Structures are given as C-alpha cells and as structure tokens.
Image: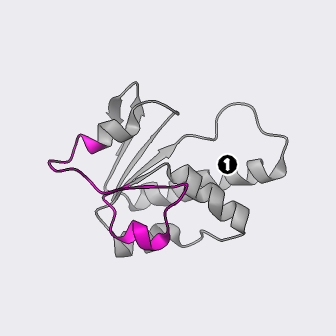
Amino acid sequence: MKLYVGGAWQGKCDYVSGKFQNKPTIVQGDRCTKEDMKNADIINHFHEYVYRCVQNGDGMDDFAEWIYEVNPSVCIICDEVGSGIVPIDKNMRDYRELVGRVLCRLAQKSDEMERITCGVGMRIK
C-alpha cells in the first residue's frame, strides 16, 4: 500500500497516475463504495470518503487494516485537512480529526508514503 498526501490542487492524482505503465483504475472518495476500493489501483480524494463516513455515522476504526488486507497494492491519495483555522462547526472538527487518525494508521501500514507539493513528490517513508 502506498499513501500520498498534500494540499488541495497540488497535482497529486497526476503524479500518482504517472507511476503506472497502463491507465490505472481510479475511484473517487466522494462517491466510491468499499466494494469499489477492493479493485482500485488508486483511491483519490480519500478525505472525501472519510467525510461521507462522518456524515453517515460510519466508523473507520479498522479501515487501514481492512484495505491493506483486501487491496494491499492500492495507492491512497488524500488532501491534508488538519492545517489552518480550526472550524467552529463540531462536525468539521470531528472530520478533520478522523482524517488525521486514519492517515496515521494508513501511514503505519503503508510501504511508501510521499507528500506532494506543486506536482513534486517528497518521499517520507
């Protein structure tokens, strides 16, 4: 499993897609299902999947373990959402916290991790 993080609009998906010889199967976090993730090469906008889980009251306690088990070669792309002004809205604070916690678990499970800025990757792990 590989994890890619960075700010919004930093070229993360293009950067990760460029690592594949053939066109990768990409699922989008705002609309994919867990079933879709099982066969994906790339999960893009993972933070939006977490947001949907928060809105639906779905837990993500075992997500990192689950995705590693069912699709150990997947690349997960996520925006950094924990920086900046802390939101007044409790749901948004909860969402940001959950993204951070899930990313920590994904980073532990990942074989590689990179931060992408301006389309350039910086290897972290």
Report the residue marked by disc 1.
96
- Locate residue 35, reporting x and y percent: 43, 74
Q: Report whether residue 36 is seen.
A: yes
Q: Which residues are magenta?
A: 17-42
**Secondary structure that dominates the magenta span:** loop
84 w.r.t. 80: above or below: above
- Locate residue 12, reporting x and y percent: 39, 37
Q: Seen in the image, is 59 located left or right of residue 49?
A: right
114 w.r.t. 22: above or below: above
> Does dot 1 land on a helix, a strand or a loop?
helix
Residue at x 55%, y 40% (from the top left corner): 80
Residue 17 falls in image quadrant: top left
- Locate residue 81, reporting x and y percent: 61, 41
Q: Residues within 10 Å of mark 1 (few under 14, many from 20)?
A: many
Residue at x 20%, y 48% (from the top left corner): 20
Q: Report whether residue 123 is seen.
A: no
Q: Seen in the image, is 86 located left or right of residue 118?
A: right
**Location of the N terminus (image quadrant):** bottom left
Residue at x 34%, y 62% (from the top left corner): 40
Residue at x 49%, y 62% (from the top left corner): 32
In this view, which residue lies farthest toward the top?
118
In this view, which residue lies farthest toward the front?
31
Residue 46 magenta-highlighted: no
55 w.r.t. 87: above or below: below
Looking at the rendered structure, the kind of residue marked 1 is Arg
